[in-house]
Amino acid sequence: MMLNEHCQIECLDCGFRTPYHPLVTTCSHCGGTWLKAVYDYAHLSHALPSRLKERPFDLWRYRELLPVMQPAPELRLSEGGTPLIRALNLGMMLGLANLFMKDERQGPTSSFKDRQAALSISALKTVGVREVVLASTGNVAIAYSAYAARAGIKLWAFLTSLVPAAKMREVALYGTQVIKVTGSYDQAKQVAAEFARQRGIYLDAGARSIANIESMKTIAYEIAEQLGEVLNESAETMEGGQPRWQAPDWYIQAVSGGMGPLGVLKGFREMYEMGWIDKIPKIGVIQVEGCAPMVNAWKQGRDTAIPVQSPRTNIATLATGDPGRTYTLLRNWMLEGSGGAFESVSDEEAYRAIHFLAKMEGMSVEPAAAVACAGLIKLVRSGQIKPHEVVVMNISGHTLPVERAILGEGWSRNVVVSEAIHAGAEEGLLAALSKITIDRFPRIAIVDDHPEARRLIRRILQSQGEYTLYEAASGREAIELAQRERPDLIILDLMMPEIDGFGVIEALQAQPETAEIPIIVVTAKELTPAEKDRLRGHIQSLMQKGDFMSDDLLDEVRALLK
Ligand SMILES: *Cc1c(COP(=O)(O)O)cnc(C)c1O
Ligand SMILES: [Zn+2]
């Protein structure tokens, strides 16, 4: 295990440089407490790419750009190297051709905090640290606990009482001493700091720790490498042997203290400096409405954030009320780069996004990650994210602690087998199964000659409600279907070969049994006044394809089914 001897730390205030040491957190020259790691970028820009070929795709792949060169093998849990997954359905719904999820759930403890824990615990282990104190909103404590357990380091975790009990128990399971602080996260941080000071124990410095920030950087390196592969298949390297990596246009993350985006942005800035990418992405910083000091400050044009004293959110992971200097740094770096956006979403919007991600993409995420997704939806809607842009969003965690709250009652059907068997083997079982009644959900017919378009509407409807869905691929099929199934609602495409949407409407209205079925017309083109006249009075609602965002369509559907 060894530290990177080419890693220097530079004071952000006076520029003084010293070799990296894990326990140095202040500048010996001016006393400044914000330091950053620097490397020999001119050398690495051409020396490193050729070495990458032989290395596994994990966090240590970029070791020359990290403060620790070699972790002890016994510490490792397969950190970093998470997949970049295309979000096809969600992308289609939002009109984004290149939407990706950096799936940080696939780390050892299911959040991107694994990177931080792996690097920081490795660094501390090299200098003989035996005990660590930290304050956490949950995920940092879980990740550090796992690595501390492997390293034989004793961990004291100060958790705000907002942290779900399931997460607290996971922390305790790893052998960490859990101290529940009834109060805000900022207060838990103060208590932890005082405890560490009194006992002389190392306190994790959060965003002021070199190892923490540097670990987050690896997310950026991986994304650039992965995007380069997906989007630039043909060319293997750029001239001069440099990798053909690609930065996204946007990196979107739910934010609490801001360490993630700060580290990720540092990574992209380094790659830009080394000539590996041709732009620095815009950063989408998403906070919860009840705790959005950064968003408030950004929207007011302030370069310092006013702390939120008592956060109002159930999403404990994101409850940092006082981002301190992290916000200012992030803002300045964003403004020096390509900018970005600070946006907030409500807890409810995040919970809805959990459903979108689960039902449209098969991704079960924790509320904090869904905040990023809800923010993405908002940024697309407001036109800040453009259809052609490449977007990567950070997805972490697991829904486990919140599934109960989100699903409510009635999400399962129960069959009691023992009773059934008593009643007499097979018959009893059949009787039990017959009790699994099929509820009568509202019935909706989707009519479109493009299978893609039908699939999109189906996904949107399925993601947010229980419906029985039918599909018809032509006007003729639609008319037959309507007569046979008598759906409660028809979503109808106008432009179809043979019998088009106008023809379907006429046919349905000519028959008393189908004349009353409400119709939402979805069209790909702007209608002429004459066409609009033809529809007037015959349909309930008209929507433009491509910009029918889920909410609009769902609101219409719900209103018409009432
Ligand atoms: C820690 C965490 C955040 C917030 O990250 P910061 O970069 O520290 O603001 C967001 N989402 C998840 C899942 C987290 O674990
Ligand atoms: Zn200094």
Image (spheres, rainbow, N blue to C red):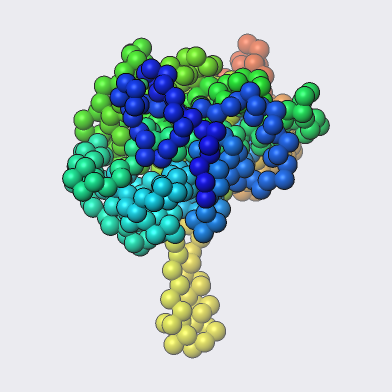
Task: Give the image quarter of residue 243.
Answer: top right
Query: Residue 485: x percent and y percent?
Result: 61, 48
Q: Is residue 82 left or right of residue 562?
A: right
Q: Where is residue 186 shown, x and y percent of the image?
A: 24, 36
Indicate the position of residue 452 as horizontal and vertical percent values. 69, 37
Q: Is residue 458 visible?
A: no
Instruction: Give the side of residue 182 with respect to residue 169, left or right.
Output: left
Q: Can the viewer see residue 417?
A: yes
State whether residue 8 is above or below residue 337: below
Q: Is residue 257 above or below residue 332?
A: below
Along the line of sight, which residue is nearer the eye, 425 or 320?
320
- Classify residue 314 as left or right of residue 35: left
Q: Position of residue 528 (x, y in %)?
A: 66, 12
Task: Determine the quadrant in which ligand 2 lies.
Answer: top left
Left or right: residue 267 versus residue 46 is left
In the image, residue 75 sits, relative to residue 515, either above or below, namely below
Q: Nearer the viewer, residue 551 or 124?
A: 124
Q: Residue at horizontal 58%, vertical 27%?
A: 40
Q: 167 or 366, which is in the foreground?
A: 167
Question: How many discs mark residues in the rendered view?
Answer: 0
User: From the image, which quarter does the C terminus lie in?
Assistant: top left
Tell me: residue 314, above or below residue 27. Answer: below
Looking at the image, which residue is at 48% across and 26% down? Answer: 284
Q: Quadrant of residue 543?
A: top right
